[in-house]
Image (cartoon, helix red, strand yellow):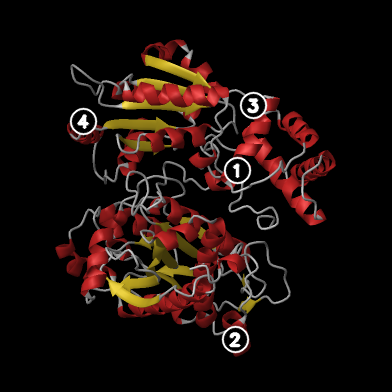
Amino acid sequence: MFLDFYHLHQQPFGVTPDPAYLYPSRTHCEALDSLTEGILGGRGFLALIAEPGMGKTTLLYQVLEGLRDRARAAYLFQTQCNSREFFQYLLSELGVDSTGMGLVAMHNKLNEMLFAEMLAGRRFVLIVDEAQNLDDSVLETIRLLSNFETSHTKLLQIVLAGQSQLGEKLGQKQLAQLLQRITVVKYLEALSLEETAGYIRHRLKVAGHCGGALFEPEAVALIAERSQGIPRNINKICFQALLEAHAQGRPTVSRDIVEKANRELDVVVTAHPTPTPTLSSSHGDTDSAEAASVPAPPQLSYKPLAESRSPSWSLWTGALVVILLSTGLALPRGLSSDAPKYIVSKTPAELSVSHEGQLSLTRELGLKINRIAIDPGHGGYDTGTIGPHGLLEKTLCLDVAQRLGQMIEENIPGVEVVYTRKNDRHVSLEERTAIANGANADLFISIHANSSNNRDARGVETYSLSLTASPESTELATRENALAQSSLHDLPELIKKVTRDQKIAESKQLAVDIQTALSQELQLVSRRETNRGVKQAPFVVLIGANMPAVLSEISFVNNASDENLLLESGQRQRVAEGLYRGIAAYLDRLHSLSQKKQKLLGENPSHASSGVATDAVGRN
């Protein structure tokens, strides 16, 4: 990658809607101010309209970030649904199990929560993204939500965000009552040439660039022309241009490099046309592949909690799967050349049967792993630990989870990655394993960052589920379980229902492999990094998992040294690579690969993707 070459700490032109990269163009500033003031002023209904790629999702995240201490928010983007399903999505986002509830019961539950927030002195904000896809009947349901009010204030502030079709839809006669209630409507416009130049400078600065201009004026002018001032297009062209300039060893990006980058992008589009997304597949600035994975409303990814607490074990019979380690293939960016890349052959679907309570023959016989569930800890209003310089545990966990998922998808063909959350939203602890169970995942990895009253505490530790834990482990579990819907005194009965001896043994082995690889990876950067070992604790998020499940505490966010490292993209990449190597080691053991391959996995110390590893060694 070009990060070290251009002295960048992070990828400046990524696709994730990070509020830190929001550029204050004229219309973006107007929209940000108007939406924030409208929410705090209790205006009720607001609307944000923008063409695809204009950054509306990033802006909405910035709105929520600015209101973090003054409002509770629900962010919905499941827009192909009926009114009942919309209520289910909303309550699920708020951590409420709506199983068996009728519309009246769900309505009353929401009303109860709104009053609780009002009494706590906080606003309640509902943001509906891609609202142009909502059916008219659902929009009418949303309009009726504005009736949640007292004689003095609106209990619910609603932001409808969408593309230009949203404006057209709101102008329809049958939605006249909804339009009358919308008090603020803001539009995002394409960036001018001057704003495009400022946008590029801003993103480079946030990513750590110092010194003279990295993009020459003629190059910026061409980017503004070819991108049509759309931020997402600017990101694509700039990213490709930096790759090309780095390949040529050029210290700055010139017009001819932008020309070549743009031609390569045109070739990619021509060779691999992007399918037209369905109405439910678009989610603001998020990647289209991520958005396409959002389940259709009739198949909720959240299994009812009552179902999630009873085991459902998958049994593959009648076929052996050959797992081969590929040694001759070039690895994509982000992993060292020695990292294992698996080729997983397919097992015919008709051979899959399920028997209640039986152990997984897939793992007993060392057969294939189909799906790996990755659980980024915390999210939404649950920020987790906050570092001395403001690093949020929820943000760190999501970033590392996405990096880990990308490594798995790129290096273990045939394995699907399932995320319990892909953005900054709240998912209850019980729901997280329900999502993994519903996807029939074969492994479950929950990612968290540690905290301690001892500001000097450092290191990583990995947990599997157990009630026989040390006082320190139990204290940590109690802190992580704070928002669970079950009480700790319920755990013994729950664990009886959902665990089997072999699953526990497999979880312990997975924890050992992850802990070993992760600790070794981070000790390359800081000699003071402590291997805190493999432990056991009663984490609610691990309860109910029908597969080997572990929880990894990847660093101490409250430790200033750890936080400084984690603020760098290179360190987050190293954490993700350590987790990946642990999973790969587990698969290596599971599939009984040759001793030569096992040795290759553990011995090679080179880490091409570590970014600032060389500079960081010994710094702490």
Helix, strand or loop at mark 2: helix
* 454 w.r.t. 39: above or below: below
Marked residue nearer the N-terminal end (4 or 1): 4
Q: Which of 89/606 is in front?
A: 606
Q: Where is residue 313, by image quadrant?
A: bottom left
Location of the N terminus by quadrant is bottom right
Comparing labels 1 and 2, the label whose residue is closer to the camera? 1
Marked residue nearer the N-terminal end (1 or 2): 1
Helix, strand or loop at mark 1: helix
Q: Which residue is mark 1?
A: 205
Neighbour tally class for label 2: few under 14, some 14-19, many 20 plus, Cα within 10 Å: few
**Which three-letter amino acid code belongs to the residue tagged 2?**
Lys
Distance from Cα at disc 4 to Cα at disc 1? 39 Å
Is 542 displayed left or right of 343 in the figure? left
Neighbour tally class for label 3: few under 14, some 14-19, many 20 plus, Cα within 10 Å: many
Q: Where is residue 469, by image quadrant?
A: bottom left
- Are discs 1 and 2 less than 8 Å apart at CB? no
The label number, if any, that marks residue 599 in the structure image: 2
* 27 w.r.t. 295: above or below: above
**Which residue occupies 81% across, 44% down?**
257
Q: Which residue is mark 3?
A: 191
Residue 126: horizontal and vertical position, in percent? 35, 31
Q: Which of 159/99 is in front?
A: 159
Is 445 displayed left or right of 406 in the figure? left
Marked residue nearer the N-terminal end (4 or 2): 4
